[in-house]
Image: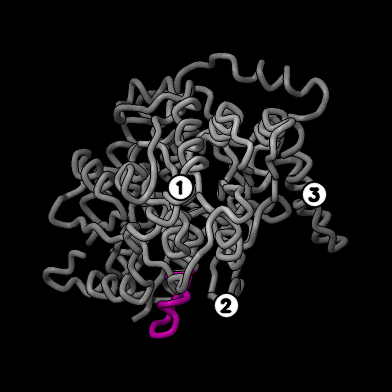
Amino acid sequence: MRILHALHFFLPAHSGGTEVYTLRLARAQAKRHDVALFFSEKIHSRQNYELLHKTIEGLDCRIVVNNLLYPDFRATFDNPRIEQRFREVLADFRPDVVHVQHLMLLSMGIVAAAKQAGARVVVTLQDFWLWCARMGQLVMPDGTICSGPKPSKCAHCLADFPYTQKRGAGHAFRGLELMRRMFGVDLSPLVERVRGWQPLLPGRGARRRHARLPRSPLPEPHLELRARRATELLGQVDHFVAPSQFLLERAVEWGAPAERVSLLRYGVDLAPRRGHRRYAPEGRVRFAFIGTPAPHKGVHVLIDGFRAAGIENAELTIFGSNRTDPAYFADLKRRAEGLPVRFAGAIPNAEVPSALEQIDALVVPSLWLENWPVVVQEARVMRVPVIASRIGGLAEGVRHGIDGLHFEPGDAVGLATALRRVAREPKLLARFAAKAQLPPRMHDHELALDSIYRGEKGARA
């Protein structure tokens, strides 16, 4: 079988849950099938929508350059230039199945293109992007959870959403492209790093706040068109996969055909940890966050809760890059001053098991409707209990008082109570770990997908 995965980003520049899951799935499938990936990347020294062909992590990767030079909001979901590049990949690779992992930064029209090329199309619902243009997170600008899509509401929500580059960026990018061609020097990584640190420079904070003053709402016709395109897509897809019951039910409520949606948990390629595990060595409980330090991930709630807990026999490690949101990361470090908090930086995917071996409990303080976080499944395999926000798929995946603890999203005091309970009763950790439900093995997950790809009757996991 020839399988083409389509997604927004991929490694090495991006290592979120979708990217890591796709990497592991594609590697497993490549042992028995022909597999390729199609995704976007921001490369300022390359011509916009240029198509590159590389081998990454041993996988055949087709990369379309997307520097976010959108003329209007419509291009964020209805982009003929990206669809044309995708058709070129379809003609070259000739897939039997196109497995869409994420459409952000691509175009909804690639589903129709895949169908026209004779491929079956399977979509894994990683989040709510089909219904929410704000990164698929259903989070309002003030941080509250959105109850559901509605063009008039979305128009105001997206008024301050930076979906395109600032004026003049195209000229600057062409200069970088010219320098790369003439002198062989690619300055785009350096430029991107400098741009990321701009909010921390003197005076930048005030200008950034000024830039976030209320703006005019997006044109509602664009939001109405996006909703129509999403509805068309829901009718074109052969099968949808939802990793959590929570997301499955919400997708069906918003138009996904129930008879073509399957619940299929992510597969994990880590071998379950065997043997006795010692928790809280030397009497100190080791808490940790592993992921992207960003506001919707609630890392500030974790640090505030850790301070409020006032635990002497505990420490906290934050594993995550400072480049995603440098201003937010700097604020986290200020909040953690005087506490036994270590910022360990981002870790390669291959080192996640080692990081989990060094901790006693994983804390997932998310403020958005998480689907089914990969890192939680990895923690299960490594016998690491989870303390999580009672929200979305987290509330479903972590059973309060059985294999972990819940607290209300954003409630630092509630989180502090959970942290104190574990610190005072470290024996809870072994009990929680013993009760945890292990995720499917990647091999079993892959076989379930094979049945879905083939359209076999009853292929609902």
> 10 Å neighbourhood of mark 1: few (<14), some, or many (≥20)?
many
Please name the residue shown 25% across and 44% down the image.
251
Residue 295, image x, y percentages? 55, 33
Q: Which of 291 and 166 is in front in this view?
A: 291
Residue 374, image x, y percentages? 44, 56
Question: Based on the displayed image, in which of its 4 quarters is residue 331 positioned?
Answer: top right
Q: Name the residue under label 2.
A: 58
Q: What residue type is labelled 2?
A: Gly
Instruction: Describe the element under mark 2 as helix, strand or loop.
Output: loop
Instruction: Describe the element under mark 1 as helix, strand or loop.
Output: loop
User: Is 82 above or below relative to 141?
Assistant: below
Q: How far apart are marks 2 and 1 (CA)?
A: 24 Å
> 10 Å neighbourhood of mark 3: few (<14), some, or many (≥20)?
few
Please name the residue shown 42% across and 51% down the image.
373
Q: Name the residue under label 1.
A: 104
Residue 5, image x, y percentages? 42, 66
Question: Based on the displayed image, in which of its 4 quarters is residue 1 positioned?
Answer: bottom left
Q: Name the residue under label 3.
A: 190
**Residue sitting at the far bottom:** 32
Q: Which of 304 and 21 is in front in this view?
A: 304
Residue 107 in view of the camera: yes
Magenta extent: 24-37
Instruction: Describe the element under mark 3 as helix, strand or loop.
Output: helix
Decide if residue 57 is on the left or right side of residue 425. right
